[in-house]
Image: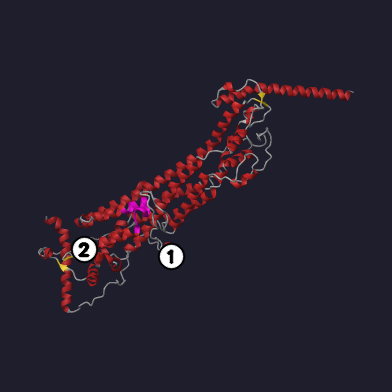
């Protein structure tokens, strides 16, 4: 009997204890009222005392400080709160690479403009009116380079543009060094057709074509990649959370309110499972995202080395002037070969009437190019500094999507140890942490994810990244395979390769010196008269050339 009496007393005390605890919880709704109103909600939504939680759809349905209306409002709040850190991280990433894009784009554009100004100033000093009268040719050259940088092969075929430039330059110089002759349009077309065979400018056009093609393809593709990054991040970050994700977030963040435990935070592993379920589609972007970043890093290495845009554009005036000097030094041989292939031109009547002008020769010479002679002023920086900076940012951005759950479930958002909310009570979270990506969510204990329905927006961005990666890899080899429709929507074409077989790795002489022209032009063969009278005629022809150059140089002073 005594034993039975003791048991009855214990039971009564237990009932009184539970009753006291319940009474205490009723009073704890005041803390919920304070916390709820601090979120901007109406404090009158919260009951003064605990109520029956049967109507609740997410949180435990026993004793509760929550009503159905509160649960709905807190669900919306939880959606906002899980999206906020993702949005903040995405916005920061977008801002970082928009700034890098602007820095690179401004730098490349200013290099183009500076190169044009430098050439103009040098040629005015050296050639005077002979350049001024032909300045449009060089202006059009730089305009075409700028259009190619902006719009690619949809706007400019780089190979054709360069060939036309050298052909046009040859035609103008050929007229100047043979001012004693008259040339028809048909004759000059014949001269242009033999430009590559004659090689009047030495090896400069070939090397400059390779270097310009490599540098421009690498530069514009890299800038295009920097443009793409913020676009992809923005579109992916705008993907809405699924209803099951919102439900899981509500349960994780605000169900503790309903039991009066407003300060209780989720267990870390519980938070990880919820966020990996919510961000499952985003995590699937990670593989192609990392491939894209690797391709960007590889192309950045090219920009620092053999495809250095700055090293090509900065001394381009010296390179073109070197080509002109080659033509001047070999003008007699070039003219003779043209006369062999295209026929003997007619003498100019106008020239014969002015032969009394004092003979003179062209004396313009150019100092060798030294990289240290011209400090870079484009955008107030250098390509090396820009690439070093952007490589750090690209490396830091790797695995951005797969690490988002860990980034969110950190710091003040979670409770360390076992004194945390596990979804039902303040206790240890027992479930295993599942992996990233859609396929792993089949076993997610906290978020219902339909793995058969991948997000369309994210799948489209995976395809975009894959395509851009292929363009970056092609640019790494000196090829442009992108389809450009920035200007008029027309399809682009593959640009002429800047890499001739192994030359991508071996032809790194950015500052080149022109070797002597040893090639034999493939033009019509004509027997040349080598009699003494022919030698006299050759000397007379040389005198006429010098006289013609003198006329061109002195013309401004004779007016």
Is residue 82 at least partly visible in the picture? yes
Q: Is residue 430 magenta?
A: no
Residue at coordinates 51% horizontally, 52% vertically from top-left?
Answer: 291
**Quadrant of the snapshot with the C terminus:** bottom left
Magenta-highlighted residues = 144-158
For the stretch drawn in magenta, what is the main secondary structure? helix
The image shows residue 34, relative to residue 212, as above or below, that is above
Which percent across, then down, holds residue 400?
Answer: 53, 45
Residue at coordinates 69% horizontally, 22% vertically from top-left?
Answer: 24
The image shows residue 59, relative to residue 471, as above or below, that is above
Is residue 308 at least partly visible in the picture? no
* In-front residue for pair 510/331: 331
* In-front residue for pair 140/533: 140
Tell me, for residue 502, which label it has, or none. 1
Residue bearing mark 2:
185
Cα–Cα span, label 2 and label 1: 40 Å
**Quadrant of the snapshot with the N terminus:** top right
Neighbour class for label 1 at 10 Å: few (<14), some, many (≥20)? Answer: few
**Is 175 left, or right, of 350 in this rendering?**
right
Residue at coordinates 42% horizontally, 62% vertically from top-left?
Answer: 504
Residue at coordinates 11% horizontally, 56% vertically from top-left?
Answer: 558
Which percent across, then down, holds residue 525?
Answer: 26, 75
Q: Earlier in the sequence, mark 2 or mark 1?
A: 2
């Amino acid at each position: 009997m005594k034993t039975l009496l003791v048991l009855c007393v214990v039971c009564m005390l237990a009932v009184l204890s539970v009753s006291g605890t319940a009474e205490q919880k009723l009073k704890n709704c005041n803390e919920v009222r304070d916390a709820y109103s601090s979120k901007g909600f109406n404090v009158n939504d919260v009951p003064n005392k605990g109520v029956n939680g049967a109507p609740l759809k997410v949180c435990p349905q026993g004793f509760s400080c929550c009503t159905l209306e509160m649960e709905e409002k807190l669900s919306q709040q939880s959606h906002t709160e899980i999206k906020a850190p993702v949005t903040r991280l995405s916005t920061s990433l977008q801002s970082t690479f928009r700034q890098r894009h602007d820095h690179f784009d401004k730098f490349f554009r200013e290099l183009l403009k500076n190169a044009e100004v430098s050439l103009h100033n040098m040629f005015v000093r050296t050639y005077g009116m002979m350049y001024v009268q032909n300045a449009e040719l060089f202006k059009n050259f730089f305009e075409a380079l700028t259009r190619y940088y902006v719009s690619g092969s949809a706007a400019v075929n780089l190979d054709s543009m360069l060939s036309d430039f050298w052909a046009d330059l040859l035609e103008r110089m050929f007229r100047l060094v043979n001012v004693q002759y008259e040339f028809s349009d048909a004759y000059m077309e014949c001269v242009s057709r033999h430009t590559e065979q004659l090689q009047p400018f030495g090896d400069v056009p070939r090397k400059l074509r390779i270097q310009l093609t490599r540098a421009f393809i690498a530069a514009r593709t890299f800038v295009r990649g920097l443009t793409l990054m913020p676009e992809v991040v923005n579109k992916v970050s705008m993907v809405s959370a699924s209803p099951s994700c919102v439900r899981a977030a509500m349960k994780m963040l605000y169900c503790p309110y309903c039991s009066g435990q407003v300060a209780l935070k989720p267990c870390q592993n519980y938070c990880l499972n919820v966020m990996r379920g919510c961000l499952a589609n985003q995590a699937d972007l990670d593989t192609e995202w990392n491939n894209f970043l690797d391709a960007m890093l590889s192309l950045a290495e090219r920009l620092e080395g053999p495809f250095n845009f700055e090293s090509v554009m900065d001394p381009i005036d010296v390179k073109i002037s070197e080509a002109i000097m080659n033509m001047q030094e070999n003008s007699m041989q070039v003219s003779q070969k043209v006369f062999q292939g295209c026929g003997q031109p007619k003498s100019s009547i106008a020239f014969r009437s002015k032969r009394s002008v004092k003979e003179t020769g062209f004396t313009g010479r150019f100092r060798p190019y030294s990289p240290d002679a011209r400090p870079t002023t484009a955008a107030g920086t250098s390509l090396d500094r820009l690439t070093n900076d952007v490589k750090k940012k690209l490396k830091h951005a790797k695995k951005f999507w797969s690490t988002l759950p860990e980034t969110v479930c950190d710091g003040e958002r979670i409770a360390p140890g076992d004194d945390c909310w596990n979804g039902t009570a303040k206790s240890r979270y027992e479930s295993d942490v599942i992996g990233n990506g859609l396929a792993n969510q089949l076993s997610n204990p906290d978020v219902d994810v339909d793995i058969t329905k991948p997000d369309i927006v994210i799948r489209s961005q995976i395809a975009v990244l894959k395509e851009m990666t292929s363009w970056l890899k092609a640019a790494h080899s000196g090829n442009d395979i992108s389809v450009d429709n920035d200007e008029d929507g027309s399809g682009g074409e593959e640009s002429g390769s800047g890499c001739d077989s192994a030359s991508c790795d071996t032809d790194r002489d950015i500052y080149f010196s022109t070797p002597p022209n040893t090639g034999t032009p493939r033009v019509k063969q004509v027997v040349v008269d080598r009699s003494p009278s022919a030698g006299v005629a050759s000397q007379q022809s040389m005198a006429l050339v010098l006289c013609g150059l003198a006329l061109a140089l002195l013309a401004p002073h004779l007016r």
